[in-house]
Image: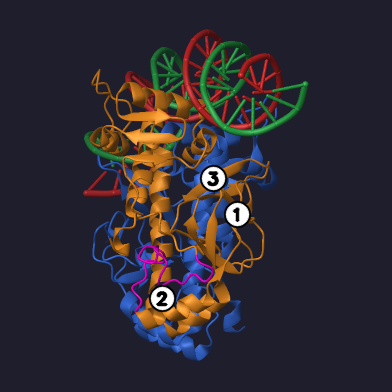
Chain colours: A blue, B orange, C green, D red
DNA sequence: CGTACATTTGATCCACTTCAAACTCGGTGG
DNA sequence: CCACCGAGTTTGAAGTGGATCAAATGTACG
């Protein structure tokens, strides 16, 4: 049995001196198409951090910007503040995902990042990443690529917030999380939500109560099984259909959403 | 009277061989902190295009990606399609603004871009921009900067769609357009909306009728004066307040939006 | 094992949507 | 020159999805 057999997702490199090359996330983090030599260089600039406890901030809106982060384990939320102190969650981050790219031309972070659970991250000092990216076109391309993907995700989020009803929103989130867990090597059918119902509602532009009711409705329709934060997707096909374009009520055939 | 006196906004360089250095938008477009030598190089890769007529596409979702564009005059909308053929407008673009950065790591454009009126653009072939940005760290930084700004704007849009009511949404859009016109050298108080009420509603996640009603309400409150697409901002202060956090009804003191 | 907090469930309310119809305005052809 | 057309816009009236309010239930944790 060789090291290739290790279960994905459970093989985080937790040694004292972790290195990008041996990190189990390397194929995901920064999805790097760098050659090994380049990875060595990237490795040399990455700083490890003490794990964050649930509720701790990685950084706050307004903090001076100096690093991008890659999530190694756990999860975080990004949020911005309205003038009257409400928060609006703009993203959730799971392992292998990058945080802080939207600050790249700023003196300070435009959003806050807070741990949803115990979380470890790799810190990538930006000024050094930038120096290094001057020499490595592939690395540069990867950074562009990450930002560009985030832009596209944002547009999808606008569509969701602007056009989708409550069921479609929740179904879209579950579908999305499922795909991300899968990509990390976890089950796409059974997973644990790292965020509270409140945070789901905040993110999706819904009241907590509505999120809860949709979960209940999905359960009675046998689409998912819910136990607290544990989710099991029972009928993936149906969930996908609800997420994408459930314009007509299945029972009545009546139109639910305007054109 | 010297050339400095020209009215800003009406001094677009329309000669046969326009150059970035002499373009009146140069201080805005790509907000370039490049030195003159660099500008010459940028200039050499920019292609000019036939003006687009109202309703024509600059590119469509799915078209192969090869250029970013800077708007020289006129305006465009970006939109994505839902599975059932509805459109969701994700952005409006006024002169000096860049289009297409969200495609940077894609083979094809993830959104469509359509002219709202007669529109001229500068085409910047991306492969050449990328080549050139390899040599010019400042240019590279500007591209990052533009993408990063768009990311931040997107988060604000999510907040709008998720938390703001109809009046706040419309006020936010007007405030935003006002600032952008101002930045281009036009009046921040009097301007012409390049988009229809329908497009405003689509963008803001509201029904056309709601947009129209808010306009009427703002007029009766003396916040703006509307004549078709012509907008005059009568009470800027009030408009800003409505845009930012009008949580309580001015008349009744009753809470309008949940916390 | 009890207190605080998260989630669920029920009942009511309301901002916005939907449906319907009138109106405005630029263009166009008789 | 004006009647007419169609698209865009406004206005009115009614309906509804989700928010809000209220309260019960479930759950984590010191």
Write down the quadrant of residue A4 in the picture.
bottom right
B100 magenta-colored: no
CA distance separating discs 3 and 1: 19 Å
> Who's the residue at 48% across and 71% down the image?
A144
Q: Residue at label 2?
A: B139
How many residues crowd mark 1 within 10 Å: few (<14), some (14–19), many (20+)?
many
> Who's the residue at 35% across and 49% down the image?
B186
Looking at the picture, tell me which residue is in the foreground, A107 or A199. Answer: A107
Q: Earlier in the sequence, mark 2 or mark 1?
A: 1
Circle 3 chain? B
Write down the quadrant of residue A253 in the picture.
top right
Tell me the magenta residue range.
B15-35
Q: Nearer the viewer, mark 2 or mark 3?
A: 2
Q: Is residue A202 toward the left or the right of residue C25 in the image?
A: left
Q: Nearer the viewer, mark 3 or mark 1?
A: 1
Which quadrant would the N terminus of chain B be assigned to in this image? bottom left
Let me know if residue A21 appears in the view.
no
Q: Is residue A88 toward the left or the right of residue A190 in the image?
A: left
Give x and y (percent) for residue A243.
61, 43
How many residues crowd mark 2 within 10 Å: few (<14), some (14–19), many (20+)?
many
B215 up-or-down from B175: above or below: above
Query: Can marks 2 and 1 be said to lie on one chain?
Result: yes
Give the dominant element type of the magenta stretch: helix, strand or loop: loop
CA distance separating discs 2 and 1: 27 Å
């Amino acid at each position: 049995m060789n090291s290739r057999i290790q279960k994905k997702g459970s093989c985080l490199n937790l040694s004292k001196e972790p290195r990008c090359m041996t990190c189990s996330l390397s194929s995901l983090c920064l999805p790097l198409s760098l050659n090994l030599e380049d990875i060595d260089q990237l490795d040399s600039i990455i700083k490890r951090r003490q794990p964050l406890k649930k509720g701790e901030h990685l950084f706050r809106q307004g903090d001076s910007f100096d690093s991008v982060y890659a999530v190694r384990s756990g999860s975080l939320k990004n949020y911005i503040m309205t003038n009257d102190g409400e928060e609006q969650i703009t993203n959730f981050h799971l392992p292998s995902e990058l945080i802080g790219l939207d600050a790249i031309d700023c003196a300070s972070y435009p959003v806050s990042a807070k741990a949803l659970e115990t979380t470890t991250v790799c810190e990538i000092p930006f000024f050094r990443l930038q120096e290094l990216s001057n020499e490595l076109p592939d690395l540069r391309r990867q950074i562009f690529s990450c930002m560009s993907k985030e832009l596209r995700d944002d547009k999808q989020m606008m569509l969701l917030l602007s056009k989708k009803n409550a069921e479609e929103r929740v179904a879209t989130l579950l579908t999305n999380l499922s795909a991300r867990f899968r990509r990390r090597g976890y089950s796409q059918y059974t997973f644990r939500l790292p965020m509270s119902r409140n945070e789901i509602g905040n993110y999706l532009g819904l009241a907590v109560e509505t999120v809860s009711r949709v979960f209940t409705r999905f359960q009675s329709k046998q689409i998912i099984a819910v136990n607290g934060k544990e989710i099991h997707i029972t009928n993936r096909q149906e969930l996908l259909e609800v997420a994408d374009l459930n314009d007509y009520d299945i029972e009545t055939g009546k139109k639910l959403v305007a054109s």
